[in-house]
Amino acid sequence: MVLPTDLFPHATDAALKTVEAHQDPQDLVFYAAWFCPSAQRSWITLEEKGIPYQYKEVNPYKKEKHFLDINPKGLVPAVEHQGKALFESLVLCEFFEDAYPTHEPRILPEDPYEKAYARIWIDFVAKALVPGFMRLFMAQGTEKQDAARAELYDSLRTFSAQIKGPYFLGEQFSLVDIVIAPWVTRDVIAAEHRAYNRGDVAAEWKQYAGRVEVRESVLGTKSNPEQYVDVYAPYLKDEAQSEAAKAIRAGRVIP
Ligand SMILES: N[C@@H](CCC(=O)N[C@@H](CS)C(=O)NCC(=O)O)C(=O)O
């Protein structure tokens, strides 16, 4: 078994090219792990907006002191902006929007109602869809896997019923799309190991997922799918020891 501390050390494919293009020192240092779906959200936002950043790869499982000084929770993603630290993927996405107001496109609507509406669905992704995918990955035995898949499909159908198209809010590629994009990128693992099928969820979901996964910022932050296998193998055996996996197992909210 590959221990989390021995994970493949860096991004590959298109994501590696993006990393290589962001090695020069900048005001904004982005600490990420190539395999991390949370980090990919913030990374997609940086790429969408063309914000100058320096990419630094971290293995968050090593809990090195330098990184704990930046994020005491020891989780990626995190940033240092003009020497000050911040973390939490969603907070970072909103920080990029606020701290770089001239960098288009906006990822949240300007209108207060529309913005609040977007946040309702961002919250839904965090509370229903992400734990739903993780529970399906971690479920052992046919009965539990069937139940987890049915629960995820229910949540995905609730989400899909609100997709305006082409993206969730309509023409604007928004933070709602960004928070679910890393899981669209990884749902092939559920397809290969847990009988998940986009088309079985809903035609709207299949079409939407197909559009999100080919967005340039999503492709540009994606590593070779083969490299994700080692990362997810322990989840599929319910042996993962990440903070998120421990929380799912204990029925707690993901940290
Ligand atoms: N709520 C956090 C979650 C971040 C997170 O769980 N990151 C994982 C990698 S995908 C991590 O750093 N794991 C290290 C660990 O669990 O010890 C966020 O959205 O930024």
Image (cartoon, rainbow, N blue to C red):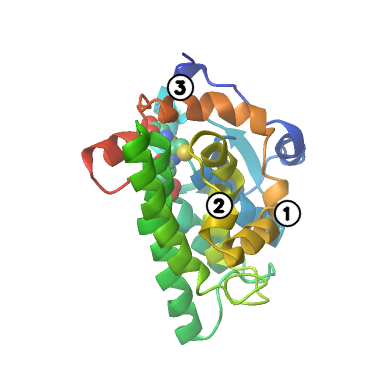
Answer yes or no: disc 2 within 8 Å of ligand 1. Answer: yes
x, y percent for residue 70:
42, 39
Give the residue at mark 1: 214
Q: Which image quadrant: the C terminus?
A: top left
CB contact under 8 Å: marks 3 and 2 = no
Amino acid marked by disc 2 = Arg
Q: Taking the image as four quarters, which one is ligand 1 found in?
A: top left
Residue labelled with disc 2: 41
Mark toward the start of the polypeptide (1 vs 3): 3
Where residue 129 appears, as percent x and y from the top left, is 42, 55
Residue 27 percent location from the top left of the image: 62, 49
Q: Mark 1: which amino acid? A: Val
Asked if the beta carbon under badge 3 is closer than 8 A to the nearest atom of ligand 1, the reply is yes
Closer to us: 106 or 136: 136
**Disc 2 vs disc 1: which is toward the camera?**
1
Q: Quadrant of residue 18?
A: top right
N-term-proximal mark, 3 vs 2: 3
Which three-letter amino acid code belongs to the residue tagged 3?
A: Pro
